[in-house]
């Protein structure tokens, strides 16, 4: 067995760009959850992994799992991320982690390297909440955190349910809802992702290691007023749904900026108006609210306060506010011992790092319910993400892949040692 080479920045970059090219027309990358394009991306991932000596399986949720055997059977150390995107997003979100996994598998295969126990490389399905309002669909199903009823309830902007979308690409939603992964088959998991912030760039660091992932409460809000003619209806006494929604949006910002909510982030990212005519007062406005925080209690209290204040403002304007909860996920503290193995690997490689918190949701947040999990961040230029301008340099991606490989090898050795001790104990 020859020594495992460092990651090849050019090859990793080329692989990432090939994957990013699978997109709907328009600016940036649009490859939505549970669409034919997303499944095509999974097929490409599977082809690359098979060439690197892995066996391929697709679970009922649509997660693609590539397994590289070890010298012995036992719980696997895993890595991976997602392949879907938001509308008109960037080339790196999710893709960086899955392509780093491809590079790691290739490096091990080329070196003829053996690990003590199996390694698994995962491309999760439907991580982005852009289509159905629910993030981490595939990893939630893998962790046993989604019900069949939830798959029917989640719907996209065209009214298509998550269950129907899964069926349309050849997946069985009934099977997906009862096919959680077996924790006994996993020892640890590491997800590599772009930071989606500017902490690493500003500090001129190579990588970040995540200690905590923020939670998120997502709500759909509908303001109902009275549509009427813009010229024939006097300003006093109007029941303008959009004017009420505009005040509601600013109230969300106001609450999140209050010192009592330090660390809370509140965002309205989508708003639609009916009837949508230049000469008609809006009779209905529907918008989203995404409240995030590292403190689960504060997150939910903030969301409740925002909705209460919005409702009062709408009532004062002669309109009605209805709220529908889309998703609610608590913040997750990632286990110290897995993070320690990652930071030890970073030290060995001479990489400059810091431990930091993730403000975005990730598949790791769900996987951690099933298996101890860590996250590696690579820098994002100007902290931009979910936009076409998203950018990470090839050398930065390669440094992340090198750390990912080193961390997986450390975790594999640790799992093998634990299995040896357990077997020895059983023998006595």
Image (tube, rainbow, N blue to C red):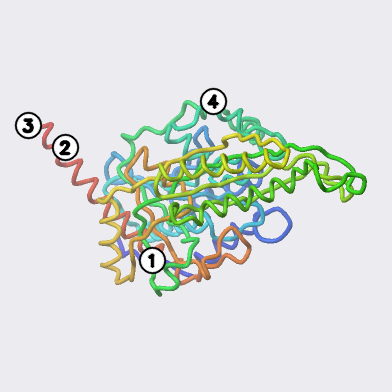
Label 3's element? loop
> At which x and y percent is residue 335?
29, 48
> Which residue has dot 2 on it?
422
Label 1 with label 4: CB-CB less than 8 Å: no
Q: Residues within 10 Å of mark 3 (few under 14, many from 20)?
A: few
Label 1 with label 2: CB-CB less than 8 Å: no
For the residue pair 291 and 16, the one nearer the viewer reads as 291
Label 3 to label 4: alpha-carbon separation: 45 Å
Question: What label does residue 417 carry, if any?
Answer: none
Label 3 to label 2: alpha-carbon separation: 10 Å
**Of label 1 and label 2, which has the lower sequence position?**
1
Left or right placement of residue 43 versus residue 54 in this view: right
**Of label 1 and label 3, which has the lower sequence position?**
1
For the residue pair 47 and 314, the one nearer the viewer reads as 314
Question: What label does residue 148 carry, if any?
Answer: 4
> Which residue has dot 3 on it?
428
Label 2's element? helix
Label 1's element? strand
Q: Nearer the viewer, mark 4 or mark 2?
A: 4
């Amino acid at each position: 067995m020859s020594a495992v080479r460092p990651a090849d920045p050019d090859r990793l970059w080329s692989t990432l760009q090939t994957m990013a090219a699978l997109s709907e027309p328009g600016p940036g990358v649009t490859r939505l959850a549970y669409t034919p394009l997303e499944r095509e991306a999974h097929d490409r991932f599977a082809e690359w992994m098979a060439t690197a000596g892995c066996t391929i399986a697709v679970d009922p949720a649509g997660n693609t799992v590539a397994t590289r055997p070890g010298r012995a059977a036992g719980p696997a150390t895993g890595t991976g991320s997602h392949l879907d995107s938001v509308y008109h997003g960037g080339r790196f979100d999710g893709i960086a982690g899955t392509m780093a996994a491809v590079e790691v598998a290739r490096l091990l295969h080329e070196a003829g390297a053996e690990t003590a126990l199996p390694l698994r490389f995962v491309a999760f399905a439907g991580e982005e909440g852009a289509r159905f309002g629910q993030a981490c669909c595939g990893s939630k199903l893998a962790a046993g955190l989604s019900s069949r009823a939830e798959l029917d309830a989640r719907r996209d902007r065209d009214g298509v349910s998550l269950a129907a979308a899964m069926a349309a690409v050849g997946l069985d939603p009934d099977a997906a809802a009862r096919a959680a992964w077996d924790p006994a088959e996993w020892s640890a998991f590491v997800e590599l992702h772009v930071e989606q912030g500017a902490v690493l760039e500003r500090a001129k660091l190579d990588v970040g290691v995540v200690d905590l992932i923020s939670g998120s409460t997502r709500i759909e809000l509908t303001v109902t007023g009275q549509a009427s003619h813009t010229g024939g209806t006097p300003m006093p006494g109007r029941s303008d749904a959009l004017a009420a929604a505009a005040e509601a949006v600013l109230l969300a910002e106001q609450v999140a900026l209050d010192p009592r909510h330090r660390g809370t982030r509140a965002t309205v990212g989508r708003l639609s108006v009916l009837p949508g005519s230049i000469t008609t007062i809006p009779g209905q406005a529907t918008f989203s609210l995404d409240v995030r925080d590292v403190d689960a209690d504060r997150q939910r209290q903030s969301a409740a306060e925002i909705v209460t204040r919005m409702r009062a403002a709408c009532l004062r304007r002669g309109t009605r506010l209805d709220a529908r909860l889309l998703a609610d996920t608590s913040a997750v503290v990632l286990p110290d011992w897995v993070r320690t193995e990652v930071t030890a690997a970073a030290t060995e490689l001479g990489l400059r790092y810091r431990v930091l918190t993730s403000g975005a949701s990730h598949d790791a947040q769900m996987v951690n319910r099933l298996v101890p999990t860590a996250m590696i961040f690579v820098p994002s230029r100007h902290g931009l993400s979910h936009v076409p301008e998203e950018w990470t340099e090839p050398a930065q991606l390669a440094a992340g892949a090198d750390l990912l490989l080193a961390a997986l090898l450390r975790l594999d050795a640790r799992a093998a040692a634990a299995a040896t001790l357990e077997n020895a104990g059983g023998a006595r």
